[in-house]
């Protein structure tokens, strides 16, 4: 039970810290050239709320099943959620799609390791984490597209400037 509370606490902290760093209404973000396939703003809280629930539940279950051998699972959970929250600050607060892209690629790597580690302890826990890994992969493609469209000296309409 303690492991599940720890996972829930880490997950809630990451969600809160990430929320504080997310600025989708900022003039900077609104000015970015974004792809047509970007979901509407309302989709993000509708997706992230259950994903955070699955992260907390899945990591807590895996930590609980791992018992005293859960050190690697806890380390991966902590690293994963630090990157998760850090992306918001890298992208929105720093106003840097490039920095955000670096953080989210690292997050994708840790997501894969997290799902694999969870699977060693409990397949159900690993399955609960898969939607998060898939959504993060989609978010990586979105971040990469935004970075590409908004590179310095580039316009999506006219191409590179001399």
Image (spheres, rainbow, N blue to C red):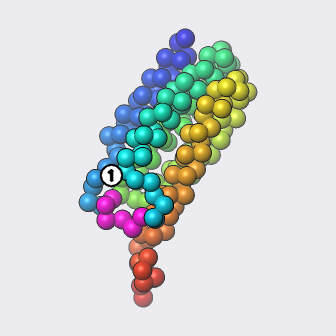
Residue occupying image coordinates x 48% and y 61%: 37
Question: Mark 1 falls on what kind of element?
Answer: loop
* Residue 5 visible here: yes
Name the side, left or right, on which 44 lies relative to 140. left
Toward which corner of the image does residue 130 lie, by quadrant? top right
Whether residue 32 appears in magenta in the rendering, the answer is yes
Q: Which residue is mark 1?
A: 24
Above or below, 150 against 123 in this view is below
Region rendered in magenta = 29-34
* Residue 158 included in the magenta stretch of the image: no
Q: Quick one: 48 or 76, which is closer to the camera?
A: 48
Which residue is found at the position 46% from the left and 65% from the top?
A: 35
Query: Crowding at label 1, few (<14), some or many (≥20) Cα neighbours within 10 Å?
Result: few
Q: Residue at x 55, y 11 (%)?
A: 1
* Residue 113 placement, left or right of 41: right
> Residue 53, how many percent across, how many down?
49, 29
Given residues 112 and 82, the one toward you in this image is: 112
On the rendered image, what quadrant is the C terminus found in?
bottom left
Could you tell me residue 73's position as x and y percent?
63, 27
Q: Position of residue 9 (x, y in %)?
A: 44, 23
Q: Residue 48 falls in which quadrant of the image?
A: top left
Compared to residue 135, the image places residue 37 above or below, namely below
Q: In the figure, is residue 157 to the left or right of 59?
A: left
Give 106 or 123, whichever is nearer the viewer.
Answer: 123
Q: Is residue 89 visible to us here?
A: no
Q: Is residue 104 left or right of residue 150?
A: right
């Amino acid at each position: 039970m303690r492991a599940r509370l720890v996972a829930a606490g880490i997950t809630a902290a990451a969600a809160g810290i990430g929320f504080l760093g997310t600025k989708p209404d900022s003039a900077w973000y609104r000015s970015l050239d974004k792809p047509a396939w970007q979901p509407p703003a309302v989709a993000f809280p509708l997706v992230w709320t259950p994903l955070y629930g699955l992260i907390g539940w899945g990591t807590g279950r895996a930590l609980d099943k791992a018992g005293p051998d859960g050190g690697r699972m806890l380390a991966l959970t902590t690293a994963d959620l630090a990157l998760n929250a850090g992306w918001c600050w890298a992208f929105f607060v720093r106003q840097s799609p490039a920095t955000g892209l670096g953080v989210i690629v690292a997050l994708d790597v840790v997501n894969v390791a997290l799902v694999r580690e969870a699977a060693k302890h409990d397949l159900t826990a690993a399955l609960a984490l898969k939607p998060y890994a898939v959504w993060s992969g989609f978010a990586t493609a979105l971040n990469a597209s935004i970075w590409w469209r908004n590179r310095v000296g580039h316009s999506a309409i006219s191409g590179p400037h001399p």
